Image (cartoon, grey):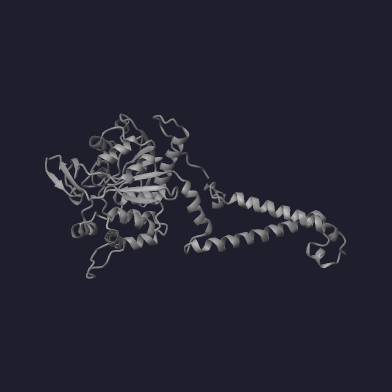
Amino acid sequence: MKRPRIPRWLYPGMHLKRWLLLLFFGITVLGLGAAIMLVEFYRGLPDDSFIVTLTGAGLDRPVRALLVALGGILLTAVGVWGLMRSIVSPFVTRGDSVLEVLYTKRYLARGPRIVALGGGNGLSTLLRGLKGYSANITAIVTLADDGGSSGRLRQQLGIAPPGDIRNCIAALADAEPLMTQLMQYRFPPGSGLDDHAFGNLFIAAMTAVTGDFEEAVRESNRVLAVRGQVLPATSVPLNLAATLESGRHLKGQVSISTAEEPIATVSIEPADVRANPEAIERILEADLVVVGPGSLYSSVLPNLLISDIRDAVAAASGIRAYVCNVATQPGETSFYSAAQHLEALIDHVGDGLFDYVLLNDNHDARRPEGWMGQPVQVDVRRLESFEVTIVEEDLVDVANAHRHDPAKLAAALMRIQQQDRAERPRQRRTVSRPTASVG
């Protein structure tokens, strides 16, 4: 049975209930004073007078008093609501309600401080779910993309690739999904801007206006009303390099993501690149640091291979969770189990980086036509050898076995965060899976 939804104005931190109660108390006192003055006048009125008829002639006095009080409350509520709408309406965008705006600005502003690291579609999927729980979200995005529109702008203009930044801004925008449609719009062939995404051009133009890529992203967050903020991991574009198990070498994210044989190691160039200082600050302040989901070698690892970011995650006082992919990725992680995903991370950046590993246990989702990946298998015995808490839940999009469901993923992470906070000081432990309600 679906639980009844609590009205938004009853949420703690909305700063509405106290003033409504005070208003109600003030009106009650005012009504009491008016009653004291008018009681003798009312008693002296004949039974057929207009006022007596209006307030329920023939009814007992307590009943009449109750009806008048209810009428007064109704009129007051309508008046207060109209006043509130008149005051707040200039700040409400079309399609939103006053309470939705207050919920976003008040309740979500008190949400946990969350940092998400990664890139590609996995990171934007995660952000789309998390923004329903907090406005204090920071997405730290890798800058290793060298394909498509981003790769062309990177070569032609010498800027960092904006594609993953664009996806995250669209996911966190208050005006989503309209903002998503706008930022992801690609110009048709023959337009002179063939296959360029509008969002990429917007960020490129903002970079030219501000003269700095990091500042351009910061201003884009503000202009596009992002719920939280999106930060580039560095101020310079990265180049990915990989060594395959055969000894062959590959360069570039596109080449690595389509590798036809197992990957042994990946690295970034320049290897000594400095991280965005603001990104480091956000990681150290976070209540929850989330790594993944996303392409293991071409989206997740590039951020952690930046030594400053790796050290910040290791030193973070908040919860650190790795979200394993729900499906293998042909070319990068063919036939990888959950333990192999985690082993690859540990081999590259060391152990002790994560407190929790979140895994999907629903392998019955619909597989899209032509889908080459396989569900990531949970090999419990191998996972038990790691110093992490393993959490298994249904995280998959039932319509697409290759993707996480944003709502399920965000809800699972918030359960972990809330339970961990309630049980501090934190210890290694098993998180119990929620019991489904029966209706």
Q: Nearer the viewer, residue 392 or 11?
A: 11
**Towards the viewer: 422 or 105:** 105
Instruction: Note whether 165 is above or below 424 in the view shown.
Output: below
Residue 397 in view: no
Q: From this viewpoint, is residue 306 visible?
A: yes
**Left or right: 130 in relation to 41:** left
- Residue at 22%, 59% in the rendered image: 153
Name the image quarter holding residue 288: top left
Q: Please state the horizontal and vertical placement of residue 295, each as a whole percent of the image.
A: 26, 46
- Most extreme residue toward the front, as rendered? 211
Instruction: Provide residue 116's location: percent of width, then percent of height.
Output: 35, 45
Q: Residue visible at 53% across and 60% down?
A: 88
**Circle count:** 0
What residue sits 37% from the left and 61% below the top? 179
In the depicted view, which residue is nearer to us: 103 or 373? 103
Residue 59, percent across and down?
A: 82, 58
Residue 47 in picture, x, y percent from top left? 86, 64
Quadrant in which residue 38 is drawn: bottom right
> On screen, 426 above or below 36?
above
Please name the residue shown 15% across and 42% down the image.
244
